[in-house]
Image (cartoon, grey):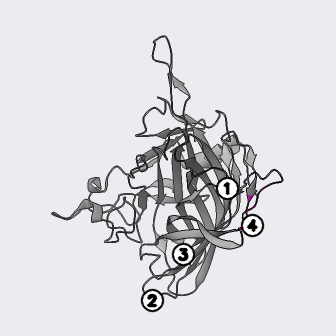
Amino acid sequence: MIRLLSTAALLALLAGCGDGQPFDFEDPADAPADGGDAGGRDSGGDAEDGDDADDGFGGDERLLPGTADPDPDRSITRFEAETEDGGGFVRRVTLLSGARLEVDNLAFDGTEPYRSDYRGPSTLNGYAVFQSAAEVETGGSEPIDQLDYRAIYGESINTVRVDGERLPRTRFAVVRTGDFSNFGFGGFLYERNGGVEIPARGQAAFRGDYAGIRVFDTISRHEFTTGDIEVLVDFDDFNASDGVRGTLSNRRAFDEDGLEIETNTSGVRRTDLSDRAILDLPTVRFVLTDAASTPNGEIVGQLNNLVVVDGKAEPYEAGEYFGVLSGDLETGGEVTGILVFESEDPRLEDIRVQETGGFTAYRD
C-alpha cells in the first residue's frame, strides 16, 4: 500500500531534527583527522602518506566513496561514485524549512533550493519529493530554462544525539533528471549518525518503505516508483560475514505528474487487450553471498530478478544494493540504503532504464 502524507505533515516530521542540517562528503581525501568522541559525525582519519585515497574505506573496495576508516561506533556517510553517465555528482544536500531542499553541484537546476510544491508528487511512500525550478530570471529579455531535477529525501523516525546535536539516526537522498538523452547527471547519499551494536547470534528482519526514480537512455523522461522493502540478516553465519537477504516487492509506478502507470508484478510478461506492452515490476531480490556485510554494519551486494517471456525465464533487472545498519540490533535498530539497477523497458524498443531508490527499514 502506498503511504502518502501531506507535504506539511511530512516536512513537519522531518523538521523535528532542526533546520538546515546537511549531510555531505566532498572527497574521501578531505576527511578530517580522527579526534572526535565515539559516535561523532567526523569521517575518520586521513589516508596514510602514499596511500591512494580511493582505497581508504576500511580496505573494502566494494564500499562506495565516503567515510574513511569506518568504525561500528561512529557515523558513516556514503555517496555514489562518479559514472560515465553523470552519476555521483551530488555530494551535499540540506533540508530547509518551508518544504525546501538545497542540492549542490548540479548545473542548470535553478538558483534556489528545490521545492515540493511544484507539479508532480510531493511525497512518495512517506518520503518527501522535491523539484528544481523550471527557469531562472537573468534580467534579460527571456528567462533561461532549467533541467527538471527531482529529489527524494528520507530520514529515520528515530533520532540520536551526536556531539551534542540531535540528528536523525539515518537518512538518504536520491537526485535524478530525465532531461538528458542518457541517464544524466545526479547522485545519491546515505548516512548513519552514531554507531551500531551488532549481535553475535540470532537473526533479524527489517521492513520498511521504498521510493525511487526511473530515468531512460536515448529519451528524455522520468517516472517514480514505490515498494515494500525487507532486509533479513543472519548474525550467526556466514563465518566471515553476516548473511543478508532482501526483497523489493509490491512495486508501483507513477508518471512525472504522479499518475499511476499500469504495471505487471506477476513476473510473467503480458500485454493488455490492445496488445500494448505493460511495464514489468516483479519482485527484486538481493543475491545471497558470503561477503555481504562488514564489521562496521555496512551491507553491499548484487540484486536481480527474472521475467517469464513466452514460457521462458529471462534475466530482467540487475544492479546493486548499498546500506548501513544502525542502533542496537539486539532489540531494535534499522537499516537505510540505496538500490540501483537497470533493465530494458518492455514498453519501448531497445530503451534501457535505470532505477535508483532509497529506503529505511526498521527491525520487525
- Distance between the alpha carbons at the discs numbered 4 and 1: 16 Å
Say what amino acid the circle numbered 3 marks: Val
Which mark's residue is nearer the viewer, 3 or 1?
3
Of the two numbered discs 4 and 2 on the same chain, state the one appearing first in sequence.
2
Structural crowding at the residue carrying mark 3, measured as other residues with C-alpha within 10 Å and reported as few (<14), some (14–19) or many (≥20): some
The label shown at residue 266 is 4
Is 184 contained in the magenta span?
Answer: no
Is residue 363 in view from this perspective?
Answer: no
Q: Residue 240: give x, y in percent of width and height.
A: 42, 85
Is residue 350 in view from this perspective?
Answer: yes
Structural crowding at the residue carrying mark 2, measured as other residues with C-alpha within 10 Å and reported as few (<14), some (14–19) or many (≥20): few
Which mark's residue is nearer the viewer, 4 or 3?
4
Residue, disc 3: 287
Which mark's residue is nearer the viewer, 4 or 2?
4
Q: Residue furthest right?
A: 273
For mark 2, give the secondary structure. Answer: loop
User: 238 and 364: which one is in front?
Assistant: 238
Which mark's residue is nearer the viewer, 1 or 2?
1
Is 100 positioned to the left or the right of 77 in the image? right
